[in-house]
Image: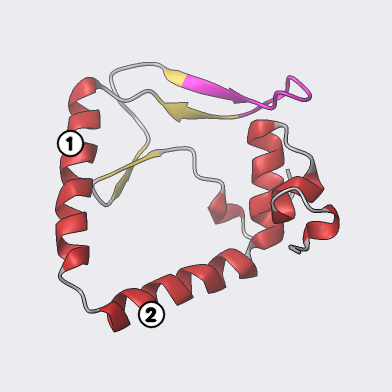
Amino acid sequence: MQLQCPGLFEQAAYIGGSWVDTTPLPRVSVTNPSTGEIVGSVPQVTAQQVCEAIDRAHAALSDWRGWSSRERASVLREWAHLVERHREDLAILLCSEQGKPLHEARGGGHPGGELP
């Protein structure tokens, strides 16, 4: 898998603002369903880590609600900019992890990635 920004291919779980790449449980292979190739692996998280992730996400939502609409809009615009900037890499990742055709991964199923 050739990515312009290899840092987008993260093989860890995001829990409470941190990447966790080891747990007491075995890692789970990520297989490309269209080729059967193992493209990576991710940590299997514990029930306690799942609860922690939920609790931290709930707290983050509470914080988010306290932001002004202007602040939230700014964050969402930046996120959209990053998605567009890394569109091709994100499409490649979707293809590798889900077996999705590249033209669908680029733009929601529209040939050439263009939306109507």
Q: Is mark 2 on a helix, strand or loop?
A: helix
Q: Does the magenta stretch include residue 43?
A: no
Asked if 36 appears above or below 81 in the picture, the reply is above
Position of 68 compared to 28: left or right?
left
Camera-side residue of 2 and 116: 116
Circle count: 2
Amino acid type indicated by mark 2? Ser
Q: What element carries label 1?
A: helix
Residue furthest to the top in view is 26
Which residue lies under the disc numbered 2?
74
Residue 71's x, y, as percent? Answer: 29, 80
Amino acid type indicated by mark 1? Glu
How crowded pointer 2 is (Cα within 10 Å; few <14, some 14-19, many 20+) is rated as few
Specify the quadrant that holds the N terminus: top right
Residue furthest to the bottom in view is 70
How crowded pointer 1 is (Cα within 10 Å; few <14, some 14-19, many 20+) is rated as some
Task: Point out which mark residue 31 bears.
Answer: none
Position of 61 compared to 88: left or right?
left
Which residue lies under the disc numbered 1?
52
- Residue segment shown in magenta: 28-39
**Colour scheme in use:** secondary structure
Query: Which residue appears at 55% of the width and 73% of the height?
Result: 81
